[in-house]
Image (cartoon, helix red, strand yellow):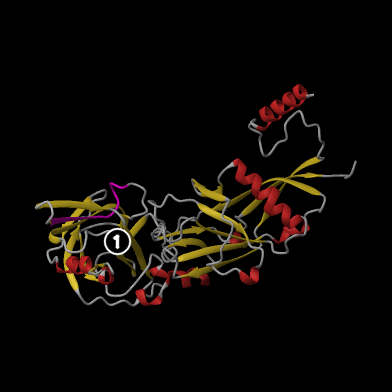
Amino acid sequence: MKNTITILLTLLIIWSCQDIDPLRPPEELTMNYGELVSDTLFATADSIVINERVNTYNAPKLCIGNYKNFETTILLRFVQLPDSGSIIDSVAIEFSTLHVLGEAMSDMPVSIYKVEEEWTETANTKDEWHTFAPTTEIDAIQIPSEDSTRIKFTISDTSLIREWISDGFFNKGLYLKCTNPGINYIREIASTEYGVDSLAPQITFRYWDEEDSVFVTDTTYIGLDATIFNNNGNEIFNIAQSQNDLLVASGIGVRTYLEFSDLSLLPPNILVQKAELHVPVWDEDIQMQDQKNSFDNTNDKQNFYINSITDLSNSELDSVYLNFITMTQSDSLVKISTTNNRAVMGKYLIQNIVNGNQESNWFSLQYQNEGQDLSIKRFRRTADNPTRLILRYFKVEQSGF
């Protein structure tokens, strides 16, 4: 009996370790699901929802500059400092430039200000930081127009750092702002969450160690940062709404909502095998016809999330969704990223609607990280029937044994 149990357990383990296609049952399972049907549904209604106060927490990039009336500024704070009583000799700050949105025709002048108010990495969600008027400038630098540059600058007035060290209460960090309104590009910088220590912002202290009577150099990457995204009166989103445009955006958060009302017409006796969603990209500028979309940030390689909206009356932009089905852009089409995601979309989200467990036929499309940078992706309008939901399902003729 023990040998029999051992053999059965071994077979189960071997079977469980097999790589099974989520869309097709194993051949050894002889279940007959019925007729396999392919069906295409078109979006029947749409909407876009805008939120100018997205959370930039954990964003891998920081942004600074001006672009077509949009302004971005940076909050930066280092929380690991030398011990109280250390005699500071010099302080240097470094960060790495990545890419730009727009054309960097010249270097960017940036002023560095003292911050006297408390803040967290969710600062972009707070109104006060969108009207913040800094008063105490401690330094000014030039950020080169070239990409992939390591910038290092010293803070000549070390009294501020000495104040931070003497009492951590005063350490509210720094505020960086482009001081030339004529600059028409946004510089992207690696943040503390970028994932590569050598590119992250760092601060280096050189101070006198009384105990050993030597100068010590100490470098740390530990800190907090946030980008403040300001619309500054740009009418692009109002224009998009008036034109019934579809788009998603990061920096200024925008999500597209799509309804597939024909889902309610599907027969109830089906088993959905998979679902594919095709959303065609429209690479035309919202404000200038026949021009390329000037806000489509080609350096933003992130994917998208598609979610089912279970309660349309509570579909605010900051709602927390499941965010487990990703979509990716391939050429001029945004579509569900993997075979497994297509199976999940069909077997769970669509099947849930077919089974009558959910009344809403609406879905939301968004950037994966809406606080990463400034980018707008435009899609073809629903009136032209471009967005389609492609289903494969088994039509079950009978049930039971």
Residue found farthest to the top: 3
Q: Is residue 356 magenta?
A: no
Q: Name the residue tied to disc 1.
A: 79
Residue found farthest to the right: 401
Give x and y (percent) for residue 345: 65, 50
353 displayed left or right of 90: right
Residue 338 appears in which quarter of the rendering? Answer: top right
Residue 104 appears in which quarter of the rendering? Answer: bottom left
Observer-nearest residue: 3 or 400? 3
Residue 65 makes an appearance in the image: no
262 displayed left or right of 43: right
- Residue drawn at x 68%, y 59% is 260
- Residue drawn at x 60%, y 55% is 386
Observer-nearest residue: 112 or 232? 112
230 displayed left or right of 381: left
Give x and y (percent) for residue 287: 42, 66
Observer-nearest residue: 265 or 165? 165
Give x and y (percent) for residue 89: 11, 59
**Mark 1: amino acid:** Val
Residue 45 makes an appearance in the image: yes
**Mark 1 neighbour class, 10 Å CA radius: few under 14, some 14 to 19, many 20 or more:** some
Q: Is residue 198 magenta?
A: yes
Give x and y (percent) for residue 299: 37, 51
- Residue drawn at x 40%, y 76% is 127
Task: Specify the segment rendered in magenta.
Answer: 197-208
Q: Secondary structure at mark 1?
A: loop
* Quarter the C terminus occupies: top right
* Quarter the N terminus occupies: top right
